[in-house]
Image (tube, rainbow, N blue to C red):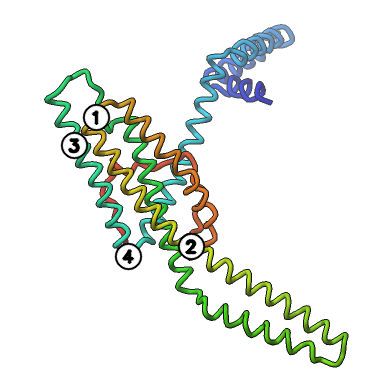
Amino acid sequence: MALGKYLRAAFTYHWNLLGFLGGLGFAALSGYPDVVGPFVLAAEAAYLGMLGTHPKFQSYVDAQAARFARTKESASAEETLREIVESLPKESIQRFKVLRERCLELRQIARDLKTTGNAETGLPLDDFQMAGLDKLLWIYLRLLYTQYALGRFLKRTKEEAIQADVTELEERLKRADMEPDAAQRDKIKKTLQDNLETCRDRLGNFQKARGNFELLELEIDRLENKIQSLSELAVNRQEPDFISGQVDHVASSMVDTERTMNDLQFATGLQPLDEAVPSLLERATVKSRR
């Protein structure tokens, strides 16, 4: 299957198609198609076999496929970004902007420090470090949106109403035992018991959602402090490799947080977090339409 992919790429390469079709045309016009044609086909087969199995060509094909996949993922991430920005209230957008601007201010300080320091020192908060901070800011923005969406869910659902339904169904189950008709009594109790279990599940889901809402607030505060700390670290310790390692360490510590956000898709509708991350530090200011 993999070899077929490389052979197909080699065959559809525009210069090959031009040469192959030209060769077939020459064979048809030569007056000896039964002689020239097989030579053209043999040359094409040799070309495909040589190029399609060449490691460098295979690496090129894989790189092109990966680039196409990244482009699609990037477009999806940009669409998610627009959805988040258009939905978040101004307070949440402002909170994100303050953190982002803090990173940009410290990045400029780091640039200024470098111009007066050792010219061979790698620039903090650049290239890979910027990409790492973009990922953390992306997680931060999604956390804000997840908390906002979960908050709306909690406002629409009243715990007291669910608890009242549970209590009422429990009382009706007790009264159902007084039904003289045994067959009718069993049907009533079965229906009530099923309804009661549903209400208890709703109550459990609500309580879990409330706990997750509080957890998200703590995670937002934690990540906010982590990002600020990393930005300050870039100024005080101008060692790009060390900073990159710290960014990776913080990102890896967010695995449980990402899993929690994925579990709350019922409230947010967001796709699971993947490798595609929109540029947040370099883009124009993020604005909310709300």
- How dense is the environment of label 3, judged by Cα within 10 Å: few (below 14), some, or many (20 and up)? some
Q: Which residue is mark 4?
A: 290
Mark linked to residue 211: 2
Disc 4 secondary structure class: loop
Q: Amino acid at mark 2?
A: Gly
In the displayed structure, does residue 283 sit left or right of residue 16? left
Residue 193 position, x and y percent, is 73, 77
Q: Measured along the vertical axis of the image, is residue 53 above or below residue 70?
A: above
Kindly identify which residue carries mark 1. 237
Closer to viewer: mark 1 or mark 3: 1
In the image, residue 252 lies at what x, y percent? 45, 38
**Residue sitting at 87 percent across and 87 percent down?**
182
Q: Which residue is mark 3?
A: 108
Give the label, 4 or 2, closer to the camera: 2
Label 1 to label 3: alpha-carbon separation: 15 Å
219 with respect to 286 (left or right): right
